[in-house]
Amino acid sequence: MDTRSESSQLIVVDSAILPDVFTKVLEVKKLMAQKSEKSFASACKRIGISRSAYYKYKDSIFSYDELFSRKIANLYLLLSDSPGVLSSVLVFLHSLHANILTVNQSIPVDGAAAVNISLRLSDESPVSLSSVAELDGVLEVKILSAE
């Protein structure tokens, strides 16, 4: 259920000036997303807010940080059908502080498999994604998109 009316608008506000209940709602949502608590009741109790406060605000409060402070990239790779090639690519991306969002690999044909990888790069990540082409077994690399 969307609680926003047609006249409502989204705004960005520093959480330091908001009542604590808003940041606590975000903490409860995070606990539940990470499966750190078994129920909303136990998550609310752990964070220190009432369930009614959580249910009142849960559909209207969202965190801003990850979507807008990180870069998203989509890669197309053609990999040799050899053991460990995909693993070495993933280890390399990890070394760039990348968070892998999706990996889609086709069935290998003629000794090569197409792989599409979506990833989020942090601000610490070097922007040298094309250097993945230097890894053994990587036959082709295309950066399909990067934000």
Image: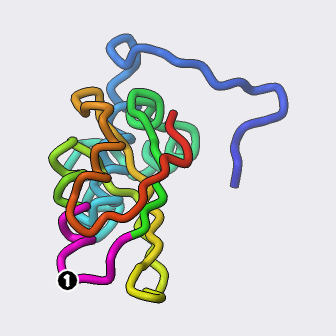
The amino acid beneath tag 1 is Pro
Q: Which residue is mark 1?
A: 83
Report the side of 101 relative to 36 (left or right): right
Which residue occupies 84% across, 33% down? 6
Secondary structure of residue under mark 1? loop
**In the rendered view, would you say 65 is above or below 115?**
above
Task: Categorize mark 1 by other alpha carbons within 10 Å: few (<14), some (14-19), many (20+).
Answer: few
**In the rendered view, would you say 5 is above or below 30?**
above
Quick one: which residue is furthest to the top in this view? 17
The answer to whether one can see residue 44 in this image is no
Q: Position of residue 98 (x, y in %)?
A: 27, 46
Which residue occupies 34% across, 32% down? 23
Q: Quadrant of residue 102?
A: bottom left
Query: 22 or 105, which lies in front?
Result: 105
Q: Position of residue 33 (x, y in %)?
A: 35, 59
Q: Quadrant of residue 9?
A: top right
Report the side of 32 relative to 109 (left or right): left
The answer to whether one can see residue 33 in this image is yes
**In the rendered view, would you say 111 is above or below 124?**
below
- Image quarter hosting the N terminus: bottom right
Q: Position of residue 121 (x, y in %)?
A: 33, 39
Q: Position of residue 80 (x, y in %)?
A: 33, 76
Which residue occupies 48% across, 81% down? 106
Q: Is residue 81 magenta?
A: yes
Query: 140 or 27, which lies in front?
Result: 140
Report the side of 54 relative to 133 (left or right): right
* Colour treatment of the image: rainbow
Report the side of 53 relative to 12 (left or right): left
Which residue occupies 53% across, 44% down? 56
User: Which segment did they paint magenta?
Assistant: 79-89
Q: Is residue 110 magenta?
A: no
